[in-house]
Amino acid sequence: MLQVANPNTVLEQRRLAACPRGVGVQTQAFTASARNAEIWDVTGKRLIDFGSGIAVLATGHRHPRIVAAVQQQLESFHHTCFQVTPYESYIALCEKLNALTPGGFAKKTALFTTGAEAVENAMKVAKAATGRNAVIAFSGAFHGRTLMGMALTGKVYPYKAGFGAMPPDVWHVPYPAEALGVSVEDSIAAIEKLFKADVDPKRVAAIILEPVQGEGGFYIAPPELFRKLRALCDAHGILLVVDEVQTGFGRTGKMFALEHMGVEADLITLAKSLAGGFPLSALTGRAELMDAAAPGGLGGTYAGNPLAVAASLAVIDVMQDEQLPARAQTLGEKLTQSLRSLQAKVPELAEVRGLGAMVAAEFKDPATGAPLPAKVKAIQDLALQKGLLLLSCGVNANVIRFLFPLTIEDNVFEEGLALLAEAIAEA
């Protein structure tokens, strides 16, 4: 009997022949269609999506209101370049982001295409506004794959390995987390030590950090860290830059994770769920800082694409109308309870932590405390076989992170939790 090749296998062979190995791919499940929190591959297999394209789909796959907004925009025009013949929707989105982002001061916003671009331009604005060059970031951070993004990122493999020297004057200090044995006092002391031993604070343009580290392991910054960083920045004329690329747009139970921290940032980077899957990012900040760059110093050919802008305006409406930040809190609590109920049976499940729906499960050897990346990989593989897509993270790749759409139906979410429990128990 003639056997027909698995379409996923055929496509994987084509991928290996046509695409560079540097573009890492987690699964061999090639997408054919998707809706809300479900994906169907080219064989027809259904997957419950607990990854959202790495935190991009807070509003799910193909939300009807976002699809309609993009279709309507497509009927008018899909590109002109805002820097050549501008359009009202770009301005409208900037106005909304200026109003939505934390900070009781006048703001301005510039639109870009990727999170890395938003970070790059945050550094450009910080340097132009302060006349300084040095930047401080945190170990375990992820800020993108561009050259400056790599320099700021606090994780060598796979992001920096093999790419040579990084841009100078980028300094890293430990990120505070109980699981890492690092306190807020340790982090602040490390900065103070930098100021005494390595870099004059008068040369430091900015300190950049994620409120919850994404790739680094979903470690949540204590509000005390933000308060002390704000005071330190104010004392030395340094800008506080908050990377909300992964934490923004409802993921942590508030529209922006910075709202948990009780301080204001000078610049905020946004992307991922900003446009519901369309490539768009933003940099929002104090108006006087955002005006520091000369005309032409910011922007990009595709920056603020009209289709992505239309999607983003719809995303904001959906976030507010469907109360997705509040739903994130509810879903995160259910997931956390489910995971903690497994800890007594699975001693390797060392810690469950989260902010809103941005939840992580960290696996360690109960006897030695050593990270268990193989355990996490086994759980991912079993879950995928059962029909559940999971993502990992952490410097040691021993953390499962949960990034399901906030629009996920209750029955699909409960099904996903059951599959997760099975995979953890069997791995």
Image: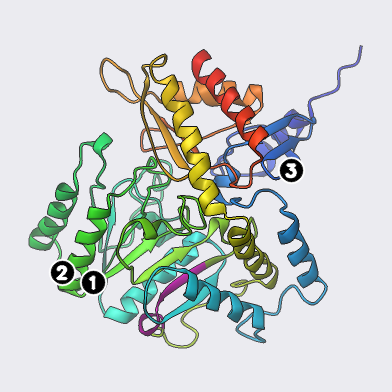
Callout 3: SS: strand
Callout 2: SS: helix
**Boundaries of the magenta span:** 282-290
Q: In percent of the image, x 58 and y 52: which residue is there?
A: 56
Quarter location, residue 418: top right
Q: What residue is pinned by disc 2?
A: 201
Q: Is residue 288 magenta?
A: yes
For marks 2 and 1, give the CA distance.
Answer: 8 Å
Rendered image: mark on residue 238:
1
Q: Is residue 10 magenta?
A: no
The outermost residue toward the right is 1
In the image, residue 298 above or below residue 102: below
In the image, residue 111 above or below residue 403: below
Label located before the other in sequence (3 or 1): 3
Residue 207 horizontal/vertical position (percent): 27, 63
Residue 370 horizontal/vertical position (percent): 29, 23
Q: Is residue 5 left or right of residue 273?
A: right
Viewer-proximal residue among 396 and 263: 263
Name the amino acid, label 1: Ile
